[in-house]
Amino acid sequence: MTVHVTGLRVALDGTPILHGVDLTVAAGEWVTVIGPNGAGKSTLLRAVGGLLPFTGTVTIAGTELGRLARRARARRVATVVQSPVVPPGMAVLDYVLLGRTPYIAPLGRESAADLTAVHDVLRRLDLEPFASRRLETLSGGERQRVFLARALAQGASVLLLDEPTSALDIGHQQEVLELVDRLRRENGLTVLATMHDLTTAGEYADRLVLLADGRVAAAGPPADVLTETLLAEHYRVRVRVIPGDHGPLVVPVRG
């Protein structure tokens, strides 16, 4: 499903955060939004997911977001925010099963197909041993994988990932991103993500969008956006950008 964002503006508590952002994510494409702290990356993702009020237009597969009922929207778009609310006492299996809510009738129960989908995601994310554990007993990295599992169990065609690997060690970072990329290719997922790690962003995304002060400062293939000049201007940092096998490698350099 293609995502179109046109003239997106968001204000929080009366303070403008996004100032007319335009971007497109083609069906099956992976686009990652980068930018310094406070640029508006998370706000952009939450607005596209329908979690924040905005002006402008967001369309999913040609349908305006505001015209979609909540259940219909949840079948199209799954969002992983940075700090989801963790219900006290809830087991991992039950939390991931919440991702199937759009397919369960009101006052109904999950089907065998719902349970199969959940167990498949738990297996893919190496979470089966934690199925009966309470969420609050898990480490930050383990919880992050559970949050992603719930989104994947939702079966949506558009996946919004806000810093999906921020709490993971380097091994699980790679595992999670490789899994998302494989599911994207196998199932035609459309992925819109935010990331702080510029090298990782460039390795996995088809295109990058550099956000600065709530506006799009640059957009295009990773090699066109991850340049020493652009990064110095918007991040106020000295870096070396080295060509890599899957994208530019960004290395900080001391002044």
Image: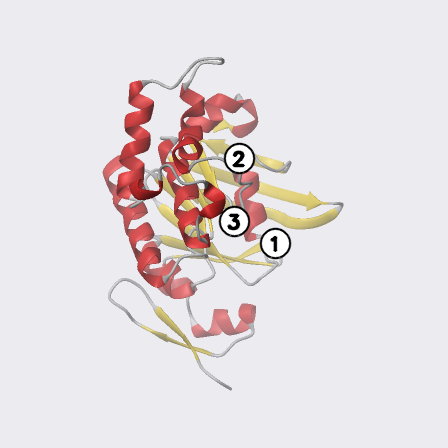
Q: Are marks 2 and 1 in contact (CB under 8 Å)?
A: no
Q: Amino acid at mark 2?
A: Val
Q: Secondary structure at mark 1?
A: loop
Question: Residue 21, can we see it?
Answer: no
Front-lying residue, 83 or 242: 83
Q: Which residue is mark 2?
A: 58
Q: Amino acid at mark 1?
A: Gly
Q: Secondary structure at mark 2?
A: strand
Q: Residue at (49%, 13%) from the top-left corner?
A: 107
Q: Residue at (46%, 28%) from the top-left corner?
A: 74
In front: label 3 or label 2: 3
- Report, in whole angstroms, how far the alpha carbon at label 1 lies from the one at label 3: 19 Å
Give the answer, above or below, for where 186 lies relative to 17. Answer: above
Front-lying residue, 230 or 78: 78
Q: Which residue is mark 1?
A: 214
Q: Amino acid at mark 3?
A: Gln
